[in-house]
Image (cartoon, rainbow, N blue to C red):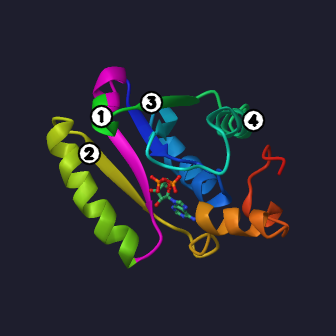
């Protein structure tokens, strides 16, 4: 059976922290779908097209990684594409508190979907898309936090 995992997020923009998680998860799955969840209530700094283009550039040389977008519930999207696993990263205790509840809900709504958690490596645990957006808005150099392929 093909093991498919979805790594859902806003990726506004993708950071080295996200990139590290996909790289570490790769040996465990046949395919990883890095999927941008579209939420009409949420304000993004970068357009969906821009965020998708960056993801495609970052993972261009990774044949087992696919880039996609979805709306609606993450668990329904997983069921639709035949993914039994979700990937999420944990940087700190507040990530854990939030992710614990979401993973329990996804397991019920998605009828057995398992979330695999990746503890952030120390080198990346301070990095978030929020912080990177603040650096960009303030005119700073965000390149240390962006994977190759993201040309901000
Ligand atoms: P969301 O909008 O759902 O919070 P993000 O795009 O911010 O999505 O993040 C997607 C996932 O990546 C989340 O599980 C988040 O915890 C994880 N993540 C983000 N930054 C890091 C990092 N520096 N180290 C580890 N995990 C991270």
Numbered disc 1: secondary structure: loop
Q: Are marks 3 and 4 in contact (CB under 8 Å)?
A: no
Query: Would the CB of label 2 be found within 8 Å of ligand 1?
Result: no
Residue 99 lies, with reference to residue 44, above or below; the image says: below
Q: Are marks 3 and 1 in contact (CB under 8 Å)?
A: no
Marks 4, 1: nearer the viewer: 4
Tell me the residue that label 4 is attached to. 57
7 left or right, relative to 99: right
- Quote the CA–CA distance across marks 4 and 2: 28 Å
Viewer-closest of 25 and 109:
109
Residue shown at the point (34%, 29%) measured from the top left: 77
Q: Earlier in the sequence, mark 2 or mark 1?
A: 1
25 left or right, relative to 143: left
Return the x and y of residue 42 as percentages of the image width and height: 48, 49
Q: Earlier in the sequence, mark 4 or mark 1?
A: 4
Numbered disc 4: secondary structure: helix
Q: Earlier in the sequence, mark 3 or mark 2?
A: 3
Tell me the residue that label 1 is attached to. 84
Q: Earlier in the sequence, mark 3 or mark 4?
A: 4
Q: Earlier in the sequence, mark 4 or mark 2?
A: 4
Quarter of the image for residue 79 reads top left
Numbered disc 3: secondary structure: strand
Q: Earlier in the sequence, mark 3 or mark 1?
A: 3
Numbered disc 2: secondary structure: strand
Return the x and y of residue 49 as percentages of the image width and height: 67, 32
Tell me the residue that label 3 is attached to. 70
Viewer-closest of 22 and 96:
96
Tell me the residue that label 2 is attached to. 114
């Amino acid at each position: 059976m093909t093991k498919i995992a979805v790594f859902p997020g806003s990726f506004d923009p993708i950071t080295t922290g996200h990139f590290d998680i996909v790289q570490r998860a790769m040996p465990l799955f046949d395919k990883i779908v890095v999927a941008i969840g579209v939420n009409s209530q949420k304000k993004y700094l970068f357009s969906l097209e821009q965020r998708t283009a960056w993801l495609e550039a970052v993972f261009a040389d990774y044949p087992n990684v696919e880039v996609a977008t979805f709306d609606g519930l993450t668990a329904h999207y997983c069921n639709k594409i035949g993914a039994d696993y979700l990937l999420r990263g944990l940087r700190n205790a507040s990530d854990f508190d939030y992710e614990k509840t979401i993973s329990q809900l996804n397991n019920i709504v998605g009828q057995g979907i398992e979330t695999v958690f990746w503890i952030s490596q120390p080198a990346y645990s301070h990095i978030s898309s929020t912080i990177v957006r603040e650096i960009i808005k303030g005119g700073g150099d965000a390149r240390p936090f962006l994977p190759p392929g993201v040309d901000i």
